[in-house]
Image (tube, helix red, strand yellow):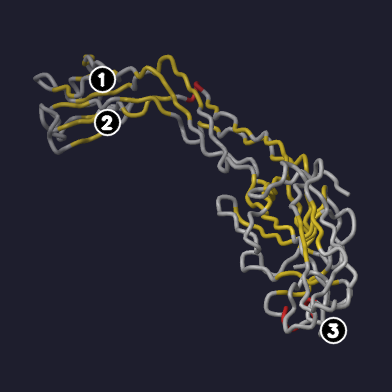
Amino acid sequence: MSEKLGFALRGVGVGTGALFLVACVLPDYQPPSDNGTTSVGGSSASAGTSGGGMGGMGASSSSTGTGGAGEEADCTNGQDDDGDGMPDCADPDCVPGYACVPAQPTDPFMQYGRARQANIGTQHATCPGGSNPIEGFFLNEWPSECTACGCTPTAECAPPTVSAFGDGQCVGAETTIPVVSGKLCYPFPAPGPLAIQVSPGQVANPQCSGSTGTQVHPEPWQKYVDFCPVDKIGAGCDPGQVCVAKSTPDYGDRVCAAAEGIINCPAEFPKKIVTSKNWTDDRKCAACSCDASAVFCEGGGVVLNNAMSCQGLGNTPVVPEKCTSLDGTGAQAFKVPPASPSLPVGGCMQGAATGAVQSTQSVTFCCNL
């Protein structure tokens, strides 16, 4: 009675991908024998691995009674071991370590046990019985979201043209002061000009290339589920409930039933957790883009200085394409800071984030809490 659910089992001697349904057989009660022990029909049941499926966990149960002795010997064997008329969870002996929980629902549920959710990157929790949990169930996929990309403009930034005039209105004789790339300081020749006019350097061979961002969350999933099958189930509970060993703080009081696919949960197991065991991830980040025609040269303007070495404290920027009178400025030289290619604000356009994480094999956990 097994179906494929493809569970992967860690730390348990079970074949990869094996799943089987643990059958809980409550044997008939046998009266105590003369030697004071209880003989139980079918006193042990064990299950190995099926040929495929959800990743079965070997289950075994056995019972040895004490025939009226003081304590319940096994709280999950469906028997009244101590002969006080109270089997398993009905016996006060079992109260400290066992509790009644909703019984496993019928098909299509193929496994029953404890389950917990945790964030990706956190440590898996050991099962209440000390074994490793069944892993490989994921939920809450990350959307396609890209880090910021960037653009790199390139160009040849020609130096500005500086024209000197012998009058203060830039209408007289004009002399061009040679400006070359890489040279910073230009002393005014004597006698100094009375005005200058600056034309910005031209941009030559502008180009622009964009980089590609990366996924903000490279991992496809936000959370995972650890699952611990319950393989020993007892009696002594109200109808519709079974007696099981109490859980640990990591797993809490929740019990869950697992089934292949996306299904509706029964009323006694209303908490629905849909997980993925297999998926595709085609999330991508497109490269940034930019317009080469928008590339301009930043810097490279002309700045007046009151020292022939351009080391003076006075620095006055010259407005391009405007006659600038030098009368009363004390300017003895001008400097031309280096220019570099740049883009205007908004000139680099973010690449689009495309694709998504899509589950190709789902497992639904229906839990009581």
Q: Earlier in the sequence, mark 2 or mark 1?
A: 1
Secondary structure found at label 1 = strand
Q: Earlier in the sequence, mark 3 or mark 2?
A: 3
State whether residue 225 appears in this view.
yes
User: Residue 226, percent across and down?
Assistant: 67, 55
- Give the residue at x 62% y 60%: 130
Q: Quarter of the image holding residue 328? A: top left
- Give the residue at x 65% y 63%: 129
Side of 62 where 12 appears, left or right: left
> Quarter of the image containing the C terminus?
bottom right
Measured Cα–Cα span from mark 2 to mark 1: 10 Å
Amino acid type of the residue that numbered disc 1 sits on in the rendered structure: Val
- Give the residue at x 14% y 29%: 310
The residue singled out by tag 2 in the image is 318
Q: Residues within 10 Å of mark 2 (few under 14, many from 20)?
A: some
Measured Cα–Cα span from mark 3 to mark 2: 105 Å
The residue singled out by tag 1 in the image is 162
Q: Earlier in the sequence, mark 3 or mark 1?
A: 3
Side of 76 where 154 appears, left or right: left
The residue singled out by tag 3 in the image is 85
Measured Cα–Cα span from mark 3 to mark 1: 110 Å
Q: Quarter of the image holding residue 156? A: top left
Q: Residues within 10 Å of mark 3 (few under 14, many from 20)?
A: few
